[in-house]
């Protein structure tokens, strides 16, 4: 069977080249800032770094199951998700670490170590880290536009970028904490109580780009990503500011921090509920835009219900194997392509999604015929 058309191949190739260059530079910066000093120091520093990796990487892998469970309809391609994860862990971490360290150094030179730490944590980190993490989401939005359908996709990609960033950041924090004798407290705080800090911040950017993808209004396409970035920076700054203030105020600061905990947990729960609502909305969109396929006798209503089911992909894979999973993916992609086309027509803009409708119908018919022929 012929592959689906790729009218944006040149754009994707340019994006891949830029991605690789940024990753190489970011990786080199990480090595120079953290690995090389540990190797030069040797002994306890290397041991602490290895122990930090053992603590951070399995936890980060476990957290990845949450966005994958939520992404039930037309799951994002593995290469895009891995690309986001690596972007957050390498490029975003490398560039952010250099800038934050520079700001901290300037603060130390201008005032005292405390001033440098405050500037780095409360001002530089939110602005710089959210910018570089947001660039990972923008990369998918612009260079892999076919794989970016709306708000749910924006959140999923943002969470993968942020978890990659948080995992490598935790390695650094755990290694420093081991050196200072604070590893247990740091692991409980960062690895157990608050592992969703970065994903929640950066998801604001994902929501912004998702709204830009879904909207029919030109001004929203520009305003929504910027508003999402501002929201991410503010949330990040508030959390870092509270933690920094708690350190400065001593016992009073601890009370302030404890008062913030219920608010933070409520915000995280609200955020998860929002994602679930948005995921269910995607299922309704897929069901709606496959109804005319039933009228055309390209699908049966039972097949539409399978595709629009939250666990339709899992059910199809279990019942019919790889062909069943491909069938559900093709049907979901067809529905979303029609959705994009309808929005583009309303706003009188062009979308490449229109060019996928006919090839996807052909692929769907071919998969359906193959399933029937195999008796499944």
Image (cartoon, rainbow, N blue to C red):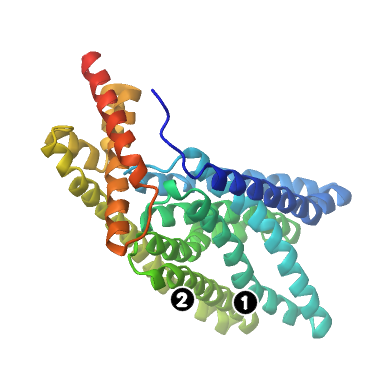
Q: How many marks?
A: 2
State whether residue 268 is above or below residue 51.
below
Residue 181 % position (x, y): 71, 59
> Badges 2 and 1: C-beta atoms under 8 Å apart?
no
Residue 249 % position (x, y): 61, 84
State whether residue 116 is above or below residue 142.
below
- Which numbered dot is residue 122? 1
For image coordinates 48% across by 64% down, the residue present is: 205
User: Mark 2 Cα within 10 Å, few/some/many (few <14, many 20+)?
Assistant: some
Q: Earlier in the sequence, mark 2 or mark 1?
A: 1
Q: Is residue 106 left or right of residue 255?
A: right
Residue holding disc 2: 260
Q: Nearer the viewer, residue 161 or 334?
A: 334
Q: Nearer the viewer, residue 80 or 93?
A: 80
Q: Is residue 262 left or right of residue 80?
A: left
**Which quadrant would residue 316 be assigned to in this image?**
top left
For image coordinates 43% across by 52% down, the residue present is: 156
Q: Quadrant of the C terminus?
A: top left
Residue 295 % position (x, y): 11, 39
User: Mark 1 Cα within 10 Å, few/some/many (few <14, many 20+)?
Assistant: many
**Which quadrant would residue 310 be assigned to in this image?**
top left
């Amino acid at each position: 069977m012929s592959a689906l058309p790729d009218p944006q191949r040149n754009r994707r190739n340019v994006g891949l080249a830029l991605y690789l260059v940024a990753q190489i530079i970011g990786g080199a910066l990480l090595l120079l800032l953290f690995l090389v000093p540990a190797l030069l120091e040797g002994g306890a520093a290397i041991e602490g770094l290895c122990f930090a990796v053992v603590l951070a990487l399995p936890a980060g892998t476990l957290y990845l199951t949450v966005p994958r469970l939520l992404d039930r309809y037309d799951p994002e391609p593995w290469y895009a998700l891995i690309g986001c994860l690596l972007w957050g862990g390498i490029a975003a971490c490398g560039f952010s670490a250099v800038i934050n360290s520079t700001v901290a150094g300037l603060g130390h030179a201008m005032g005292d170590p405390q001033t440098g730490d405050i500037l780095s944590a409360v001002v530089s980190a939110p602005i710089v880290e959210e910018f570089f993490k947001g660039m990972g989401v923008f990369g998918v939005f612009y260079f892999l536009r076919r794989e970016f359908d709306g708000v749910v996709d924006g959140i999923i990609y943002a969470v993968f970028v942020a978890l990659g960033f948080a995992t490598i950041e935790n390695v650094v924090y755990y290694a420093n904490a081991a050196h200072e004798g604070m590893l247990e407290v740091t692991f409980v705080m960062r690895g157990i109580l608050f592992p969703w800090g970065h994903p929640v911040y950066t998801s604001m950017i994902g929501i912004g780009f998702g709204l830009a993808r879904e909207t029919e209004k030109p001004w929203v396409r520009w305003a929504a990503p910027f508003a999402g970035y501002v929201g991410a920076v503010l949330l990040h700054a508030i959390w870092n500011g509270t933690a920094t203030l708690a350190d400065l105020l001593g016992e009073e600061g601890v009370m302030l921090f404890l008062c913030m905990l219920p608010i933070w947990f409520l915000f995280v729960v609200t955020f998860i509920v929002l994602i679930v609502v948005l995921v269910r909305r995607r299922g309704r969109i897929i069901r709606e835009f496959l109804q005319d396929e039933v009228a055309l006798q390209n699908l049966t209503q039972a097949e539409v219900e399978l595709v629009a089911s939250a666990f339709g992909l899992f059910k199809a894979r279990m019942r019919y194997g790889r062909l069943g999973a491909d069938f559900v993916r093709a049907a979901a992609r067809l529905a979303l392509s029609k959705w994009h086309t309808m929005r583009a027509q309303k706003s009188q803009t062009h979308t490449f999604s229109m060019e996928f409708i006919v090839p996807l119908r052909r692929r769907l018919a071919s998969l359906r015929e193959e399933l029937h022929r195999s008796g499944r």
